[in-house]
Amino acid sequence: MLLENGADRVWIDDGAVAEQIRAAGEGDYYDKVLELVGEATLADSLRSVKKGGIVSLVGKLSETEDLEKLHLMELIPSGIKLTLYRGTYEDFMSTPLDAVLTLVKQGSLKLKIGRVLRMEQIVEAHRCMEENEAEGKIVILT
């Protein structure tokens, strides 16, 4: 989905994505990195951008440390920018879902549906998500 929407390359961070980039002969590091996992892989993402690069932390999928407990000044290399977004309930409720659905219907926003489960299977849905078995968006039917 990221590639289809303009990303140059997608790396799965195993804790050493900076080394993966170097080993793949991709040349210099990236200008921008979108960090979707959270604190568990943040330090590695910060090592994956070149001087003047930006890491945007927008997700928290890991169950590890809280951002507040990290020593950010020690993690952020000189010349690298870190931005972060943490939405609130109000932010979520003000999301223009109709506009998003219109983009999906038009084909402008492509979403991969991984699993379709019923509300009674919500525990299974969480298990799939936590164990990286979703293979796309998980849809819950009521």
Image (spheres, rainbow, N blue to C red):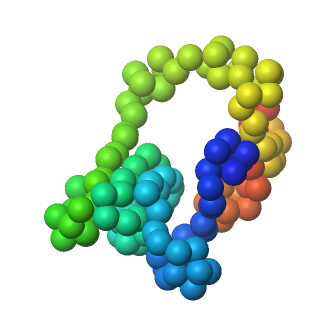
Residue 52 as seen in the image, left or right of residue 40:
left
Residue 101 as seen in the image, left or right of residue 25:
right
In this view, 118 is above or below 8 = above
Residue depicted at 67% across the width and 42% down the height: 5
Kindly indicate the quadrant of the structure image that contains residue 106: top right
- Residue at the front extreme? 27
Q: Picture coordinates of residue 126 (x, y %)?
A: 65, 52
- Residue at the bottom extreme? 23
Quarter that holds the C terminus: top right
Q: Picture coordinates of residue 103 (x, y %)?
A: 71, 22
Residue 9 as seen in the image, left or right of residue 31:
right
Residue depicted at 81% across the width and 47% down the height: 115
Q: Nearer the viewer, residue 75 or 66?
A: 75
Kindly indicate the quadrant of the structure image that contains residue 86: top left
In this view, 95 is above or below 133 = above
In this view, 128 is above or below 112 = below
Q: Picture coordinates of residue 61 (x, y %)?
A: 50, 55
Kindly indicate the quadrant of the structure image that contains residue 101: top right
Q: Picture coordinates of residue 1 (x, y %)?
A: 71, 47
How many numbered discs, if any?
0
Q: Is residue 80 visible?
A: yes
Q: Nearer the viewer, residue 116 or 58?
A: 58
Residue depicted at 46% across the width and 69% down the height: 29
Residue depicted at 36% across the width and 53% down the height: 54
Q: Is residue 121 visible?
A: no
